[in-house]
Image: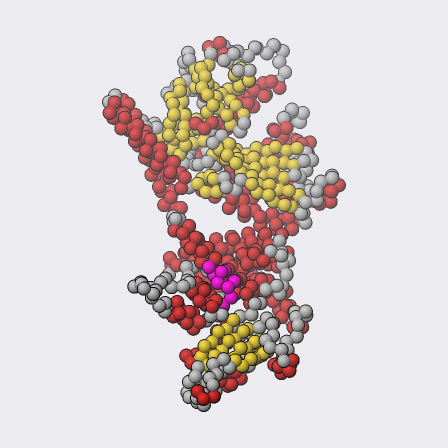
């Protein structure tokens, strides 16, 4: 039962996500019946699953919500923003109830029950009871009046072509002998509804000489108006079911209802007849008769083998117990279920901790492989070197396959913000549209889990501060509807996530003034536009005059920056005043294992992520003649560089031949001067302890094959240090001529 509950909770949360997404789309397209069915199906599935595991509090709540959805589907109530808001609240509450079930509690607490009662009361008051109190005559005012039986017969006009149940009834010859009166069944039928038209069919009547006075030869074709279902109508004839031929064809108006019920069926493997019985379009007795006829196939003439039985759907249509449209819809449903089951059969659910354990073992395998490779190279045996080379290739393939297991699409994270943008925009009184691109972009599962909070801060900040009100936008000649976009794409071995708005942009003067007031910068200091924009990430910094429920306390953007740096990433801001702001988050694809480039400075080893390495150069001797020179001429391009010896204060003289590793981060090039180049290296990233978390320029550590520890360089931070030094040196006044850039 515990395993069943776990599966139910997992699948129900997926159904809730689909329901929420459909509700958000339905608000924008209220006339789309497919979206209404897409909202109804998850609720119906969750209620059915809760009933299976006997979770009554979920069944009770979902049942009322399903009633409202059923009225919505039948057209009794209309889609509105208020209704969507309440139904979204119901989604959230069902999610909370699932958490209660998952925690093993027997019932939700009082606060949660009160929240659910409030939602149900509003549904009942505003949409369910309100509709029931409406006069019945106003529901379908244009429907033609139903003619009584006597009126139809008086008109002498045969069958009435109106939308009623059609009952075709042929009594058997022995009905009278068994004491059954055919007319009594017709009287009982009238208790379920109104017999609009009845026609007696004497086609079985023999000639007078052959007639048996104790035999029944009567048949009837009946037009019947009733709200009863097909099973209830068939039950009227239970006592003579074996002695009559009975066909019940539902009204055409019920076709849409049957098809909707069919679409709402759970995704279980069912046969055609089972599907039709499940939705009430076919009774079990009709199905049994159809199956008997299907299997009663005579052998082919002149052959020993029987011909293949005809399809059940054709038999049911011939017996006039079901419409062809329903059979076709049931066949499509069967195909959809089988295709989904086939797709699910190729998938397997794995607990995240098991996957993390696999990645840890693969990391240890990579380290062990590096150690083996080192020992083989020292031994100098060609056969051993060849074997270890093959082993390394296999380890690389295992590493890539294991990491691929953790890669997930970011689109699911993006889609959560549809609801956030809707709710926040209504709270702010703004009309804001969210556009999403690049949802298929994949990155490590651990990165996806940790990027949600920073994105939430940026989205809410853009809606509150960035995008102006409709009045202000119209005064500026903009569209009254603001636009917020989320985009993800790969770039140079990293993933970039952009959060952009078309609002007012950052006010450079206001930011600088606030920074001076807070003592973050000195008055009169020249700062570039990028440096001014980066001030918004300082702790406690805010330019908002009034604190709101969403922002203004200065505790959001610094958290964004800190969390992203914790993922070995970087956030940049680009703004154009009056036109909008774009935040770019650059993250590594994985936090576990990377391809690295090993370099050395003195006796220490360092790792540079290989996907950021552009090329390697030898640093010319004359380029080091001045200790103040931190740039090179790289084929006509100024290349600022940073020396690892200077950065880490490594004592001793550098070697006569130094090397420059040219790296590229966030579209900017820089150089890292090292003593030696040691080649490519599979790097298992090990986090640094709390003592070293604030070190700038270090992103982690790894273990070499020799057992030594090598530091992983934070290339983006180093590039910013090198570029910042160069910008400051160029901005500072100098009385001497700038030395000519040496050629490399």
| Helix, strand or loop for the magenta stretch, by majority | helix
Please tell me whether residue 10 belongs to the stretch shown in magenta: no
Position of residue 51 relative to residue 208, above or below, is above
Can I make out residue 542 in this image? yes
Question: Where are the magenta residues, as a range?
Answer: 322-331
Does the image show residue 118?
no
Quarter of the picture containing the N terminus is: bottom left
* Depicted 392 relative to depicted 92: above or below: above
x and y percent of residue 338 in the render? 42, 55
Q: Quick one: 460 or 63, which is closer to the camera?
A: 63
Relative to the observer, which residue lies in front, 74 or 545?
A: 74
**Residue 726 occupies which quadrant of the picture?**
top right
Q: What is the count of numbered marks?
A: 0
Left or right of 623 in this view: 4 = left
Q: How is the image coloured?
A: secondary structure
At 56% from the left and 35% from the top, the residue drawn is: 584
Q: Residue at x 41, y 36 (%)?
A: 592
Identity of the residue drawn at 68% across and 34% down: 577
Residue 436, image x and y in percent? Answer: 57, 43
Extreme residue in the bottom direction = 213
Determine the image quadrant of residue 649.
Answer: top left
Q: Nearer the viewer, residue 490 or 341?
A: 341
Where residue 157 sits: x, y (%)? 62, 78
Q: Residue at x 48, y 21 (%)?
A: 662
Query: Is residue 328 found inside the magenta-colored segment of the image?
Result: yes
Judging depth in this view, the residue of 647 and 222 nearest the camera is 222
Give coordinates of residue 493: x percent, y percent: 47, 31
């Amino acid at each position: 039962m515990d395993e069943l509950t776990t599966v139910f909770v997992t699948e129900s949360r997926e159904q809730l996500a689909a329901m929420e997404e459909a509700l958000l789309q339905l608000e924008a397209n209220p006339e789309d019946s497919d979206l209404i069915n897409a909202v109804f199906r998850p609720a119906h599935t969750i209620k059915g699953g809760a009933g299976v595991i006997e979770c009554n509090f979920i069944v009770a709540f979902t049942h009322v919500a399903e009633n409202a959805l059923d009225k919505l589907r039948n057209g009794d109530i209309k889609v509105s923003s208020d209704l969507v808001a309440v139904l979204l609240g119901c989604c959230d509450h069902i999610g909370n109830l699932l958490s209660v079930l998952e925690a093993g509690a027997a019932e939700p607490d009082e606060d949660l029950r009160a929240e659910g009662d409030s939602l149900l009361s509003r549904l009942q008051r505003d949409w369910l009871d309100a509709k029931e109190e409406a006069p019945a005559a106003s529901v379908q005012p244009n429907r033609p009046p139903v003619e009584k039986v006597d009126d139809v017969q008086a008109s002498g006009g045969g069958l009435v072509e109106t939308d009623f149940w059609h009952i075709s009834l042929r009594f058997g010859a022995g009905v009278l002998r068994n004491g059954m009166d055919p007319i009594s069944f017709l009287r009982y039928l009238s208790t379920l509804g109104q017999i609009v038209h009845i026609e007696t069919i004497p086609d079985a009547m023999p000639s007078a000489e052959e007639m048996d006075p104790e035999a029944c030869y009567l048949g009837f074709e009946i037009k019947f108006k009733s709200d009863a279902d097909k099973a209830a109508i068939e039950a009227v004839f239970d006592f003579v079911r074996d002695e009559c031929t009975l066909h019940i064809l539902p009204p055409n108006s019920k076709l849409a209802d049957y098809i909707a019920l069919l679409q709402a069926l759970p995704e279980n493997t069912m046969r055609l007849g089972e599907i039709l019985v499940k939705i009430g379009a076919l009774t079990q007795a009709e199905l049994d008769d159809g199956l008997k006829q299907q299997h009663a196939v005579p052998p082919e003439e002149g052959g020993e083998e029987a011909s293949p039985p005809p399809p059940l759907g054709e038999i049911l249509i011939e017996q006039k117990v079901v419409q062809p449209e329903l059979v076709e819809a049931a066949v499509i449903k069967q195909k959809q279920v089988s295709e989904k089951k086939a797709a699910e059969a190729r998938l397997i659910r794995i607990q995240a901790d098991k996957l993390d354990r696999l990645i840890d073992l693969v990391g240890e395998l990579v380290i062990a492989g590096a150690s083996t490779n080192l020992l083989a190279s020292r031994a100098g045996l060609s056969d051993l070197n060849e074997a270890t080379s093959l082993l390394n290739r296999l380890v690389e393939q295992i590493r890539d396959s294991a990491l691929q297991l953790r890669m997930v699409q970011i689109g699911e994270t993006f889609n959560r913000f549809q609801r956030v943008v809707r709710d926040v925009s209504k709270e702010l009184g703004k009309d804001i549209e969210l556009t999403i691109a690049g949802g298929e972009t994949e990155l490590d599962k651990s990165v996806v889990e940790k990027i949600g909070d920073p994105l939430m801060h940026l989205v809410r900040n853009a809606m509150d501060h960035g995008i102006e009100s409709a009045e202000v936008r119209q005064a500026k000649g903009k569209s009254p509807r603001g636009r917020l976009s989320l985009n993800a794409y790969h770039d140079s071995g990293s993933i970039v996530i952009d959060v952009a708005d078309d609002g007012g942009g950052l006010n450079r003067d206001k930011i600088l003034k606030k920074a001076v007031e807070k003592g973050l910068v000195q008055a009169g200091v020249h700062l570039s536009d990028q440096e001014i924009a980066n001030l918004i990430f300082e702790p406690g910094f805010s330019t908002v005059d009034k604190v709101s429920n969403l922002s203004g306390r200065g505790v959001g953007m610094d958290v964004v920056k800190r969390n992203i740096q914790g993922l070995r990433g970087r956030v940049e801001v680009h703004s154009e005043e009056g036109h909008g702001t774009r935040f770019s988050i650059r993250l590594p694809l994985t936090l576990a294992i990377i391809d690295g480039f090993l370099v050395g400075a003195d006796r220490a080893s360092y790792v540079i992520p290989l996907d950021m390495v552009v090329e390697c150069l030898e640093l010319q001797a004359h380029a080091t003649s001045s200790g103040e020179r931190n740039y090179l001429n790289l084929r006509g391009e100024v290349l600022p560089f940073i020396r690892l010896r200077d950065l880490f204060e490594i004592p001793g003289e550098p070697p006569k031949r130094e090397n420059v590793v040219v790296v590229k981060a966030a579209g900017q090039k820089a150089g890292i001067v090292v003593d030696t180049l040691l080649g490519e290296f599979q790097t298992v990233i090990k986090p640094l302890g709390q003592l070293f978390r604030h070190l700038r320029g270090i992103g982690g550590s790894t273990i070499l094959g020799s057992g030594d520890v090598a530091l992983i360089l934070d290339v983006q931070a180093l590039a910013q240090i090198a570029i910042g030094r160069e910008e400051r040196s160029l901005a500072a006044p100098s009385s001497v001529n700038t030395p000519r850039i040496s050629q490399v």
